[in-house]
Image (cartoon, grey):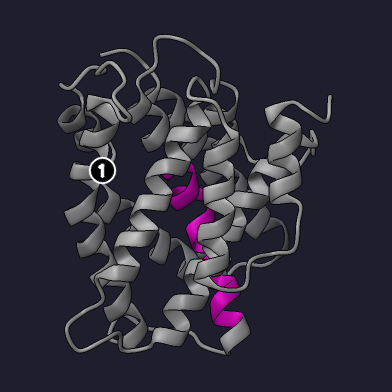
Amino acid sequence: MNDDTPDQKLLQIVSGPKPSTIEDVIRVMQSIDATLPNDDGLKWFNFLYLEVTRYIGENPPTNGWEDAAWLTRLDVVFANFYFRAIADFLNHEPTSPNSWEALFDARHSTGIDRIQFALAGMNAHINHDLSLALLQTDDELHLAPKLDSPEHDDYERVNGLLEAVLPSALKVLSSGILGEIAQDTGRIGQLLAIWNVRVARDLAWDFANHLRNLEGIHRQFALAAQDKLTGALGRSLMLSF
């Protein structure tokens, strides 16, 4: 891989020290955005992720988060799964998730709208990565949050913020940015009807709890099945409507 190619630069960005703060995460996403050309579909998921991360950081609940330390750590751990997925794919690792390959394989395809790339990335990140990020965060902090816990309350508040910001962020992608020609503006509702962020995040919470009780081959089988289904959904989001 030539050192001057966008992919080599991208690999260097995601192979550096793991971000440990939200500010670190944002800086990595900004570097990815600056590196990828506009005809790379990954740029548009990264754009959406960056916008959402900023929005959540700038719009905390009126009385603050109930467990800010847990939520912040979850956000950082979660983002690191995204960066690792990029590195694994570019390094041709055999463990590269099928979930992410749905987006990565189509990065340079024509005839796919930016919003489709963005939602395919969210699909992979939430349906595949989020349950694993929840387990890692809870293990690090020695927690096992229940549905009536402060952590779950914060998790649900994030769901509300995502539902508030996603339509407007996707509208930016569908209508063009930086003065570029607008793309199709009629697919946001169709795509969000297929892929609902609150439902996906609630299922990720439930799947994390399911995985807590599984070991060995049973856990591997559950993860493999989830990865396969997520990849199939990601590819469906790339289809024309």
Residue 213 found in image quarter: bottom right
Nearer-the-camera pick, 149 or 30:
30
Residue 127 magenta = yes
199 shown above or below 97: below
User: Which residue bears the numbered disc 1?
Assistant: 169
| Residue beneath the point at 56% across and 73% down | 21
Quarter of the picture holding the N terminus:
top right
Residue 214 found in image quarter: bottom right
Residue 8 magenta = no
- Provide the secondary structure element on which disc 1 rests: helix
| Residue beneath the point at 57% across and 87% down | 141
Q: Which residues are magenta?
A: 122-139
Categorize mark 1 by other alpha carbons within 10 Å: few (<14), some (14-19), many (20+).
some
Nearer-the-camera pick, 200 or 51:
51
As drawn, is 215 to the left or to the right of 191?
A: right
119 shown above or below 71: above
Quarter of the picture holding the C terminus:
top left
160 shown above or below 45: below
